[in-house]
Amino acid sequence: MLGFQWITAITPGPNNMLLTTSGANFGFMRSLWLMIGILLGMQSILLLVAFGVGSLLLVYPPLHLILKIFGSLYLLWLAWKAASAAYEKLETDEVPTKPMQLYHGWCSFSTRKPG
C-alpha cells in the first residue's frame, strides 16, 4: 500500500493537477481544504481495501466479471464522449472566485463539474 500511495502522490494525475491549479490561483492556505479532501478520498479507498472489500471478488467470481464488463462499457462511453465532443474555445479570461472545497477533493475520483 505504501508503494501505491507513493506512486499516486508523485504522478501527474487529476488530483495533482487540481492542487497545482488551486495553489496557483489561490495560494497554499486557501487550497488546504482541497488537499485535505483529496487525502480523505485516498484514505477512504485504502480503508475499503483494508476492510477486505476486494476479497468479495474472490468469494463471488461472477462479481469480478460484472465489474470488468461495466468498467469496459464505462471506458467505451468515455471514449465516445471524448471523440464526439464539439470543439469549444478555451476561455482563459474567467478566473475562479473561490477555491474548491473539501468535498470536491474527497469526491475527486468521480465525474463531476467543480462548482
Image (spheres, helix red, strand yellow):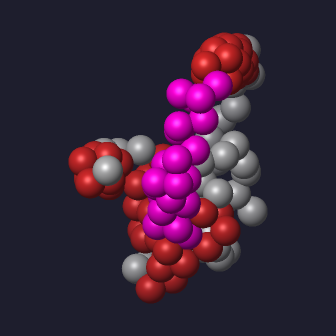
Q: Does 83 appear above or below 57?
A: above
Is there any visible trace of residue 105 in the rendered image?
Answer: no
Give the side of residue 19 with respect to residue 76, left or right: left
Residue at horizontal 64 percent and vertical 25 percent from the top: 60
Q: Position of residue 84 (x, y in %)?
A: 73, 14
Would you say 2 lies left or right of 115 here?
left
Is residue 38 rendered magenta in the image? Answer: yes
Q: Is residue 83 above or below residue 13?
A: above
Q: Considering depth in this image, is 53 or 19 the residue closer to the camera?
A: 53
The C terminus sits in image quarter: bottom right
Task: Reply above or below: 51 against 38.
Answer: above
For the image, the number of numbered tags is 0
Q: Which residues are magenta?
A: 37-60
Left or right: where 18 falls relative to 69? left
- In this rendered view, identify the residue nearer to me: 88 or 81: 81
- Residue at the front extreme of this rendering: 59
Position of residue 74 measured from the top left corner of the image (x, y, whole percent): 69, 22
Q: How far from the left and from the top, in percent, is residue 57?
A: 58, 29
Instruction: Give the quarter of the image for residue 95.
Output: bottom right
Is 57 one of the magenta-colored residues?
A: yes
Predominant SS of the magenta segment:
helix
Q: Residue at x 67, y 68 (%)?
A: 103
Q: Residue at x 67, y 17 (%)?
A: 62
Q: Is residue 81 above or below residue 48?
A: above
Residue 1 x, y percent position in the rendering: 32, 50
For the point 43% across and 79% down, the residue is: 27
